[in-house]
Image (cartoon, helix red, strand yellow):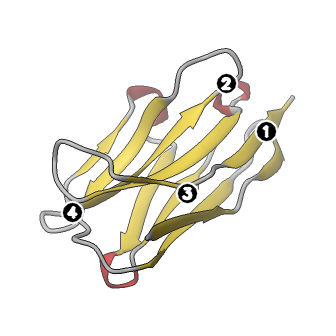
């Protein structure tokens, strides 16, 4: 069984920064990519950022480009999300995900709450 554990969420003022971390544990798996999603109250879960380990290709949702940075260490099955210049609309539960291929996200964390206040 694979578990993804997120950490680093919290309460921050608008304009501030947070760094989320996610580490996979349990059995080994072919770690093709890892990423972050978020879900705000009353909204659907949305993609935030992802990284494909072999190529280093990174994707961002357009509203976080230039403010968020995804990074990680595939050897440690760990991914980070550095969030700067946070806005009220970034408030959400943030979920880490891992995929064994390009078409699917196989494993999910339980989430970490990020709240941005004015």
Residue 45 sits above or below residue 68 on the image = above
Q: Residue at x 20, y 63 (%)?
A: 56
Element marked by disc 4? loop
Quadrant that contains the C terminus: top right
Task: Mark 2 and mark 1 in contact? Answer it, CB < 8 Å.
Answer: no
Q: Secondary structure at mark 2?
A: helix
- Outermost residue toward the top in this view: 42
Q: How many other residues sit within 10 Å of disc 1, few (<14), some (14-19) or many (≥20)?
A: many
The residue mark sitting in front, 4 or 3, is 4
* SS at circle 1: strand
Mark 3–mark 1 distance (CA, rounded to whole Å): 15 Å
- Image position, residue 84 (x, y; %): 61, 48
- Left or right of 30? Residue 63 is right
Q: Check residue 89 in the rendering and tell me which mark sits there, or answer none.
A: 2
- Assess disc 4: are there few (<14), some (14-19) or many (≥20) residues with their C-alpha within 10 Å of its C-alpha: some
Depth order, front residue of 111/51: 111
Residue 7 vs 42, above or below: the answer is: below
**Residue 115 tag number:** 1
- Residue under label 4: 32
Q: Position of residue 29 (x, y in %)?
A: 28, 73
Q: Earlier in the sequence, mark 3 or mark 1?
A: 3
Quarter of the N terminus within the rendering? bottom left
Q: Earlier in the sequence, mark 4 or mark 3?
A: 4
Q: Is residue 28 above or below residue 80?
A: below
Task: From the top left corner, tell me how far across and down residue 62 is, in percent.
Answer: 38, 28
Q: Position of residue 4 (x, y in %)?
A: 52, 64
Which residue in the structure is indicated by mark 3?
A: 82
């Amino acid at each position: 069984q694979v578990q993804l554990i997120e950490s680093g969420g919290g309460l921050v003022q608008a304009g501030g920064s947070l760094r989320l971390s996610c580490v996979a544990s349990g059995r080994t798996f072919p770690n093709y990519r890892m990423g972050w999603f978020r879900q705000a109250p009353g909204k659907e879960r949305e993609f935030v950022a992802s990284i494909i380990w072999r190529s280093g290709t990174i994707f961002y949702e357009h509203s976080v480009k230039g403010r968020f940075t995804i990074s990680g260490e595939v050897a440690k099955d760990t991914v980070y999300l550095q969030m700067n210049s946070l806005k009220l609309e970034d408030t959400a539960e943030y979920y880490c995900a891992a995929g064994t291929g390009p078409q699917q996200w196989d494993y999910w964390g339980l989430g970490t709450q990020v709240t941005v206040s004015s």
